[in-house]
Image: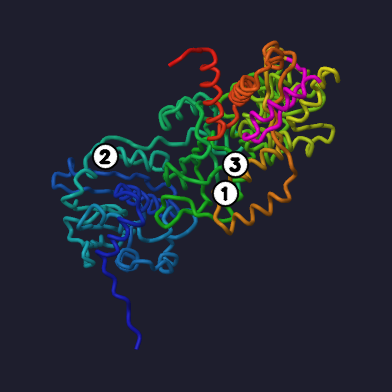
């Protein structure tokens, strides 16, 4: 024997309030939605029928209730039973004509949202010349349907919904709150919405509603200031016909966190869906805030977000293309304005350039980058120096920039977000582009070797210097290079850096991973960092002439520490101990005497 599920309406209301709807304020939206659907249905057969939704807050009704009157099609008694007393049945709604494409409501549970703020709901409705029907629903699941007495009957077709507020929901029924919510959700509705004597609808959206129509930039800037609270850098018209979407992208005037996904203001058929829609634009377009109206995109059941489907994916791509097109036009027609934009939002453009050739060309031509010969765009750098030589990290650039410049090597600082990836992608777009990552070993090949006789005479000194820093794992060499003011340079090749990281990881690893790392270390190329002393520096030459081995060791340790600090290299515990020993040792030699 089959049985029918028993529905606990109180439990359903609790589910709606805590898990479906984000806030009780949606009750105003659902009442407006039902009213607009009813007006739309009536105008399908009576094009000249009035289109008015009138809301009376408790302050004006005099009996503590809130009433919403509409001039819609109304319901018959049979329709009242089907639409107001059955939860989740959509087939009858379709048969009765209230689930067609042009209607806002699709889920048939909107009226239940009113139980978030009311214990009792009364609906007076009249369809055509039929008598007025009264439906009364209670939060505990009971309802009653009767023919309204003459004194309560409506004179014209339409519906009046009356809410009896719950004691803990008074704040949602004040005139100011109801007016603000009606304006928030229904400002763009194609019907007149009045709360008391205040009309809360503004009519047509401020953006073009037909593709190709002229853009009233001044009006959109005012709208952005009033609605979004920003003074936009620019506004971009949007249109995606397959989604029935029109709107505007507001380009934000200040930097934003790329990791923070922008919330967009989305209307569906002119009713506000959400002020914080996620995923309407690609992630790289975090510098834009959209305000759009669509007819084809699907809402979630709560009508507070967009449903992720193939149409939304296609819409996202189309909107991204339009924002990208704005950037390209800016580059072609207003480079100065583009430079201003890039100063604010370069991260977004560079993120797009990682997979978009046109944006990569834009970054190549217009984005100024740090180099050791001044600020240049990548295109300017290539025109001057041919090969695009770059340091892949900020520390690497700091360590090598000045010395490279002294050796006539121009280097781009590619240590900022996305810069290395963009430089390495340039040859993919343009095969004529030559790039080269700067290696510390590139510098040593440009240093001048010493005269063989001088180098032979320095061998005892180099042996003493090597003993002084042996525990640091570096090799001491001596060359002649510019700038003369630099006494020593600490150079770490990528393979040497890998070996250092491998050793540090081995010290922290357990037995299992230690074995794996030992195997890797066995195959790693033997390469050590170098402490390159500058023979052109007067201090270094004086150190090489010292006859006291202890003093030579202290001096070399001090030069090693200074090279680490000047090169922004990490200071390990062993390095810190060496620095401390050299400082105290030199201080002790400088202040002789007995205790």
User: Is 525 left, or right, of 146 in this rendering?
Assistant: right
- As drawn, the label of residue 319 is 3
Q: Which residue is mark 1?
A: 243
- On screen, residue 588 versus residue 139, left or right, reads right
Q: Position of residue 426 (x, y in %)?
A: 76, 35
Q: CA distance from mark 3 to mark 2?
A: 34 Å
Disc 2: CA contacts within 10 A as few (<14), some (14-19) or many (>=20): some
In the image shown, does 87 or 575 lie closer to the viewer?
575
Marks 3 and 1, how far apart at CA: 11 Å
Where 69 falls versus 97 (above or below)?
above
Q: Position of residue 394 (x, y in %)?
A: 62, 29
Q: Is residue 208 above or below residue 144?
A: above
Q: Give the vertical position of 590 relative to 583 (above or below).
A: above
Camera sees residue 506: yes
Sequence order check: which comes first, mark 1 or mark 2? 2
x and y percentages locating residue 367 in the rendered image:
67, 25
Q: Secondary structure at mark 1?
A: helix
Start and end of the magenta stretch? 457-482
Asked which secondary structure carries label 3, the reply is helix
Q: Residue at x 20, y 58 (%)?
A: 120
Say which residue label 2 marks. 177
Q: Which residue sits at x=57%, y=49%? A: 243
Counting residues from the start of the chain, the first of labels 3 and 1 encountered is 1
Question: Residue at image x 27%, y 65%?
Answer: 11
385 or 495, nearer to the observer? 495
Up the image or down, 479 lies above or below 23; here it is: above
């Amino acid at each position: 024997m089959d049985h029918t599920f028993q529905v606990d309406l109180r439990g359903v209301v609790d589910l709606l309030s805590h898990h479906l709807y984000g806030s009780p304020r949606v009750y105003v939206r659902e009442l407006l939605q039902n009213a607009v659907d009813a007006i739309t249905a009536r105008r399908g057969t009576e094009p000249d029928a009035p289109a008015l939704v009138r809301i009376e807050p408790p302050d004006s009704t005099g009996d503590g209730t809130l009433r919403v009157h509409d001039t819609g099609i109304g319901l018959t008694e049979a329709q009242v039973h089907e639409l107001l007393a059955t939860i989740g049945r959509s087939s009858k709604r379709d048969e009765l004509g209230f689930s067609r494409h042009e209607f806002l409501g699709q889920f048939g549970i909107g009226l239940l949202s009113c139980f978030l703020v009311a214990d009792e709901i009364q609906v007076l409705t009249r369809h055509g010349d039929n008598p007025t029907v009264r439906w009364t629903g209670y939060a505990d699941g009971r309802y009653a349907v009767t023919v309204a007495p003459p004194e309560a009957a409506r004179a014209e077709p339409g519906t009046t919904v009356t809410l009896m507020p719950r004691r803990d929901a008074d704040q949602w029924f004040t005139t100011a709150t109801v007016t603000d919510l009606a304006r928030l959700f229904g400002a763009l509705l194609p019907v007149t919405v009045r709360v008391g004597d205040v009309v809360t609808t503004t009519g047509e959206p401020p953006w073009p509603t037909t593709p190709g129509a002229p853009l009233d930039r001044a009006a959109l800037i005012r709208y952005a200031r009033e609605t979004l609270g920003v003074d936009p850098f620019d506004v971009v018209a949007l249109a995606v016909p397959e989604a029935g979407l029109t709107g505007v992208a507001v380009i934000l005037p200040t930097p934003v966190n790329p990791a923070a996904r922008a919330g967009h203001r989305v209307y569906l058929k002119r009713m506000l869906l959400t002020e914080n829609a996620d995923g309407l634009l690609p992630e790289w377009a975090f510098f834009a805030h959209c305000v759009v109206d669509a007819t084809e995109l699907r809402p979630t059941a709560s009508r507070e977000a967009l449903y992720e489907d193939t149409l939304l994916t296609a819409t996202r791509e189309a909107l991204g293309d339009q924002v990208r097109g704005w950037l390209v036009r800016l580059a072609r027609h207003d480079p100065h304005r583009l430079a201003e934009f890039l100063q604010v939002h370069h991260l977004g453009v560079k993120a797009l350039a990682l997979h978009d050739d046109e944006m990569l060309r834009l970054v190549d031509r217009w984005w100024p980058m740090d180099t050791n010969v001044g600020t240049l765009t990548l295109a300017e750098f290539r025109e001057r120096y041919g090969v695009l030589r770059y340091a892949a990290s900020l520390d690497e650039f700091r360590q090598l920039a000045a010395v490279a410049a002294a050796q006539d090597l121009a280097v781009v600082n590619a240590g900022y977000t996305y810069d290395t990836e963009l430089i390495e992608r340039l040859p993919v777009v343009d095969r004529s582009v030559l790039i080269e990552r700067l290696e510390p070993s590139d510098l040593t090949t440009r240093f001048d070797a010493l005269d063989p006789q001088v180098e032979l005479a320095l061998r005892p000194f180099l042996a003493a210097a090597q003993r002084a820093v042996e525990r640091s794992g570096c090799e001491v060499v001596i060359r002649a290079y510019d700038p003369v003011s630099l006494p020593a340079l600490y150079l770490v090749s990528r393979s040497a850096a890998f070996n250092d990281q491998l050793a540090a990881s081995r010290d922290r690893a357990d037995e299992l991973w230690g074995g794996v790392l030992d195997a890797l270390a066995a195959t790693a190329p033997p390469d050590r960092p170098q402490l390159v002393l500058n023979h052109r520096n007067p201090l270094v030459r004086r150190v090489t002439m010292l006859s006291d081995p202890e003093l030579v060791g202290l001096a070399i340790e001090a030069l090693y520490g200074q090279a680490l600090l000047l090169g922004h290299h990490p200071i390990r515990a062993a390095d810190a101990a060496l620095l401390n020993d050299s400082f105290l040792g030199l201080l002790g030699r400088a202040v002789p005497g007995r205790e």
